[in-house]
Image: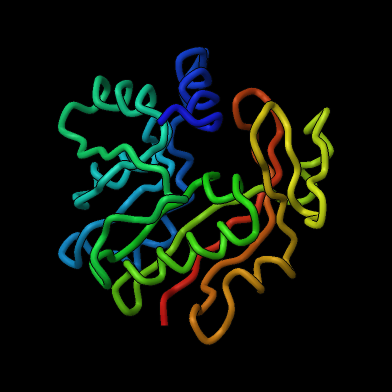
Amino acid sequence: MNTPDKKYWNTTYTELPFHVDHDGWLDKYAVWLDPQKGKIVDLGCGLGHNAKALRTQGFDVLACDLSEKALEQLRQDEPQMKTLQLDMADGLPFADGSLQAVVADLSLHYFSRSTTVRIIGDIHRALQPGGLLLCRVHAVAELAVKQGAVAVKDDPFLYESEGILRRFFDERQLRQFFPDPEWETVERNEQAMERYGQLKRFWEVGVKKL
């Protein structure tokens, strides 16, 4: 099904003028990860910089994305990479407790509140006890550079721009989406970095399934 989101990302990855390399953000979580503990899923992998870094370190990685164009490019760059095209909003095809970690780098902030809650719940279901969700999401401060973004009614953190939805998080929202006692927070901080030629403001979150 060629949804507006899928069309947007296929166009984006067809026209993207350059790739982004892994910036080392996952390195701090190495103490909790073990190549012998099971699969790591990279949700919304894009061109696969996180998946490539993890595979190089010996992990069993499955790179997943909505865009077949992104996955085609990833397979050209990394022929041995396992890939799966999926829309995470439709549910995750992983057995209960089967994953040691899920990476979602700038990919969880494109959904309504109810869909975001459902996706996070699905990730929780698929993780092993003690498994990690490692993610980065747009910060509220990122709104300042999203020209033309239009607020969605009844949700002050959800905006529409370029034909797709984007959610912007503050710390209070993060506590709501990753509540105790379901999750233990191991990392939560607001950062800024250059991405695709411009400064991006985001939250980095690491949570452990309890």
- The colour mode here is rainbow
Instruction: Give the farthest residue toward the bottom.
Output: 181
| Residue drawn where x is 19% and y is 67% of the image | 37
Q: What residue lies at 57% left-to-right and 58% top-to-bottom?
A: 116
Q: Position of residue 44 (x, y in %)?
A: 43, 42
Judge whether 41 appears above or below 7 on screen. Answer: below
| Rendered position, 207 above or below 166 | below
Looking at the image, residue 39 sits to the left or right of residue 18; the answer is left
- In the picture, which quadrant includes the N terminus? top left
Q: Is residue 192 above or below residue 2?
A: below
Q: Residue at x 36, y 71 (%)?
A: 125
The quadrant of the picture occupied by the C terminus is: bottom left
Name the spot of residue 40 as percent of width and height, x first: 28, 55
The residue drawn where x is 24% and y is 48% is 61
Most foreground residue, 13 or 188? 13
Quadrant of residue 163 within the rendered picture: top right
203 left or right of 26 in image: right
